[in-house]
Amino acid sequence: MKILVAPNAFKGSLKALEVTEKIAEGLRLADPYFEVVSCPIADGGEGTVEIFVETVGGSYHECEVQNAIGEPITARYGILADRRTAVLEIAAASGLGQLPQSKLAPMRATTFGTGQLILDALDQGCRRIILGLGGSATTDAGTGILRALGVRFLTDSGYEIPMGGGSLGYLEKIDTSRLDPRIRDCEIILPCDVFNPLLGEMGSASVFAPQKGANPEQVQLLEENLVHFAALVQKQQGIEIGNRAYCGAAGGTAAGLLAFLGANLISGIDFMLHQIDFEGKLYGAACLITAEGRLDAQSLEGKGPYGVAKRAQVRGIPAFCITGQLPQAFDPQQFELFNTVFPIPTRPMSLGESMEEAGELVKFTAWQIGSMLKVAQKFIN
């Protein structure tokens, strides 16, 4: 029996490659004769760089950059085997994972460090930039990245505004005359893990800023500042960014890079699955096992497990999902794309315990699935 194992990362706990290994171990405990095909996935969020480097081929590079609040850190990105394609994650330099809860700063958090990563990739000779947008700590519409590349964000008096989304209301002029000329020769691809627009009830401030530490008053101010930014972009660049799909990704980073760098905004999971030949690996599989740390309504909006299960459904292949956490008000109809869902906790446990023990819990759950499949196989035969 061929079983395709295609999990996402368990954020803050296990990388996608680690989840894949644990599922494979559990399945082989149930039956060492299972043909387990490993296919770790990413959707533009955590793990994008690793998936590319490990499956497509390439090397890792590190450089010193600023995190979202300006502190020095070392961040990693990948350069693929063609030596002209760099794969980066906004989370590596400007992500929530780089900051403790006590240091979240939704009004001044900046993507400047991600811009420094891009500059380093340009210095390495790369002219194709793939930037995964999941996990950012920012709502600055990508202005930090653009600043690092030479763009100036000015008041009426010609002074540069402070970094962060909280200062965008002071913006009156955007000067692109000093933009690094190398970037104009680049193809910039933004695999997005959410479809949200920049503005409105489903926009980046309303939906995601609270996760980045913003209180209701700050959410409202960030929304107003993004409205102002979008209007200025429309006036200066002639590009509408407020209501386009994907433009809300990474606190509006997708919108800013679309407007000033001509970035290509695409579905993260569709792009990633094409790059790793997921359809080829799915061919001939008896079932699919996918996984994600938390399965919720956002999982249905272009996240990895949803993307792979949808493709399995088209081929009539059953899909099982392993997850660390389900919503308290779980509605099975919301997740009917999966034939069934397996939460990993084996006893009443805290989130911290579940994350700490995630590897063994995933392995045990995979053993349960494998044992079920082994019994089913006997009845079918």
Image (cartoon, rainbow, N blue to C red):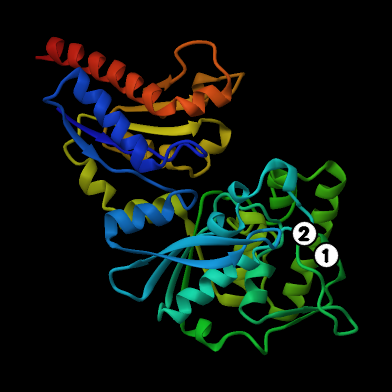
The x, y position of residue 302, in whole percent, is 49, 45
> Who's the residue at 68% across and 46% down the image?
208
Q: Is residue 18 above or below residue 97?
A: above
| Amino acid type of the residue that numbered disc 2 sits on in the rendered structure | Arg
Inspect this view and state whether residue 364 appears.
yes
The residue pinned by badge 1 equals 167
Q: Is residue 195 left or right of residue 144?
A: left
Most distant residue in the left direction? 381
Q: Quadrant of the N terminus?
A: top left
Q: For the residue labelled by badge 2, is the local secondary structure a helix, a strand or a loop?
A: loop
| Amino acid type of the residue that numbered disc 1 sits on in the rendered structure | Ser
> Who's the residue at 72% across and 58% down the image?
109
Q: Is residue 165 left or right of residue 286?
A: right
Q: How far apart are the two marked residues, 2 and 1, measured between alpha carbons? A: 8 Å
Label 1 crowd (10 A; few <14 / some 14-19 / many >=20): some
Most distant residue in the right direction? 157
Q: Is residue 2 above or below residue 371?
A: below
The residue pinned by badge 2 equals 108
The x, y position of residue 269, in whole percent, is 42, 49
Inspect this view and state whether residue 326 appears.
no
Q: In the image shown, does 166 or 358 lie closer to the viewer?
A: 358
Callouts 2 and 1 close, C-beta under 8 Å: yes
Q: Is residue 137 above or below residue 317?
A: below
> Who's the residue at 37% across and 24% down the image?
360
- Residue 287's quadrant in the figure? top left
Label 2 crowd (10 A; few <14 / some 14-19 / many >=20): many
> Who's the residue at 62% across and 85% down the image?
179
Q: Is residue 173 left or right of residue 189?
A: right
